[in-house]
Amino acid sequence: METSNSTLDLFRPEEIRRRSQDLLGVAGSVGLQHVDVDLSGLSDILVMLLETTRENYPDFHIPPYGVWRDFEAGDIDRWSALANARAFESAEELLAAAADLAILGAYMKTMHPSGWTYEDQMTETRVSGNQASALATFHMFAAGSFSSEMTDPYRVDADTLIRMEKDELAFGLQWDLQDDVDLLEAMQKHLKRLGEALALRPDLFSKGDVTRPGLLAVELAKESGEAVSANVILDKLLEALAPVWVGGAQTGDITLGDSFRHSGTGSAETDTVIPFHMAAQEMVYALVEPFAWAGFEVSELELLTAPADDVHASVFLKAGVLKIRDGPEAPTEDGVRDRMVEIRAITIALTDKLADLLRRELDVPAEQLPLTCILEGGTSRLGTRFLREGFGESEKLGRYLNPGAVFWLPFGA
């Protein structure tokens, strides 16, 4: 089937931002069915955002947003210890291993048992949520759980992902083999899909008889000179990992991944679709540091959007900027999907507005304070705190954002 330009647009980060901003415009004019927006509260969030950023990074030397910050839970640089122990012989070896871990760490940020906590027994660090997912992935990686080569444990091989057993997953994730069996089976299938998708694209992920996600980063580094385009990375991931993006919208026989139809927008078929591609964008954010360690810059990061997740939605819900409208009757199936789409899209657009406010307040251009640093310095930390403390709609949020269509959305159980 021939792919139209309008369909291809749905895979571009610019289109994610445009359609999210369009929905925010609708919310401010004729209104949306499931959410209300009150922009007057953004100034209150700005104050909290500045306080949070200065508390964590008083010199404003902020590292990039991404799963590497979760790997450092408890202020422990686990990767440096692992890399020093491994003593990589070349930048290419280091990049392949770090990119393996980065992509898998973002991919495994999925549903998990309610109330799950993970304990790093070496440091006695106990964490929950995204940090639990990250630490579990890191320690399984360090233990060689994803490697098919005993002499080289720090890697992720496609055939190992395909063959992963539930008991090994239960041990590594610290889940209960009986009580959490449904989630373990879902994770097992989730990893199998990734392994199969990698194996289907040897041109991107294979070298000789080895197939690993990190080999994509190695190939892009060879092709790109000193700077690797974030847009190119995202495009390759969305194209190559199409088989794992299950549960979203389709047009014809084309799977649109983390994209969903909204019944109140557009007229043409693809105009009703709001794209997010959050897991793929999380992977791009996670690859910034592996490329940097190997001597490469990631350019065009400003094209990426904020995560359309519960953490960032909670920032605006807590302050009353975003309000979820609950009717007297339970919404229809379409209504459940529309509500999820509205919350996620408005979250992306509001985060952009908040970022612009912060830059104006500090009188710095976007080049000096990119979105990735704003996410790490403030919004992700602020939202995580709000969810941990709990507030009126926090318990509903995970359920609203995870109606069951896409397993890999990281919104909790």
Image: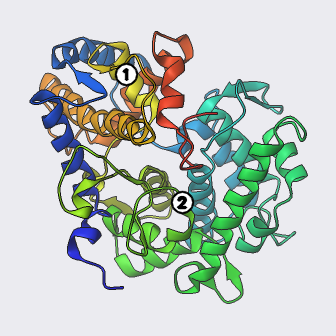
Q: What is the quadrant of residue 134 in the picture?
A: top right
Q: Distance from label 2 to label 1 (Cα)?
A: 28 Å
Q: What is the quadrant of residue 202 in the picture?
A: bottom right
Crowd around label 2: few <14 · some 14–19 · many ≥20 (10 Å): some
Q: Position of residue 35 (x, y in %)?
A: 29, 26
Residue at 78%, 44% in the rendered image = 182
The amino acid on which the numbered mark 1 sits, given as a three-letter code, is: Val
Q: Is residue 9 above or below residue 370?
A: below
* Viewer-proximal residue among 208 and 3: 3
User: Of tags 2 and 1, which is closer to the observer?
Assistant: 2
Q: What is the quadrant of residue 28 in the picture?
A: top left
Residue at 48%, 57% in the rendered image = 287
Marked residue nearer the N-terminal end (2 or 1): 2
27 sits to left or right of 156: left
Judged from the image, the secondary structure of the residue bearing numbered disc 2 is loop
Judged from the image, the secondary structure of the residue bearing numbered disc 1 is helix
Q: Is residue 296 above or below residue 14?
A: below
* Viewer-proximal residue among 301 and 289: 301
Residue at 82%, 71% in the rendered image = 148
Residue for badge 1: 315
Q: How many marks?
A: 2
Q: Are marks 2 and 1 in contact (CB under 8 Å)?
A: no
Which image quarter holds the C terminus? top right
* Residue 294 visible, this angle: yes
The amino acid on which the numbered mark 2 sits, given as a three-letter code, is: Val
Which image quarter holds the N terminus? bottom left
Crowd around label 1: few <14 · some 14–19 · many ≥20 (10 Å): many
Residue at 34%, 25% in the rendered image = 59
Q: Is residue 183 above or below residue 43?
A: below
Residue for badge 2: 246
Q: Position of residue 68 (x, y in %)?
A: 55, 44
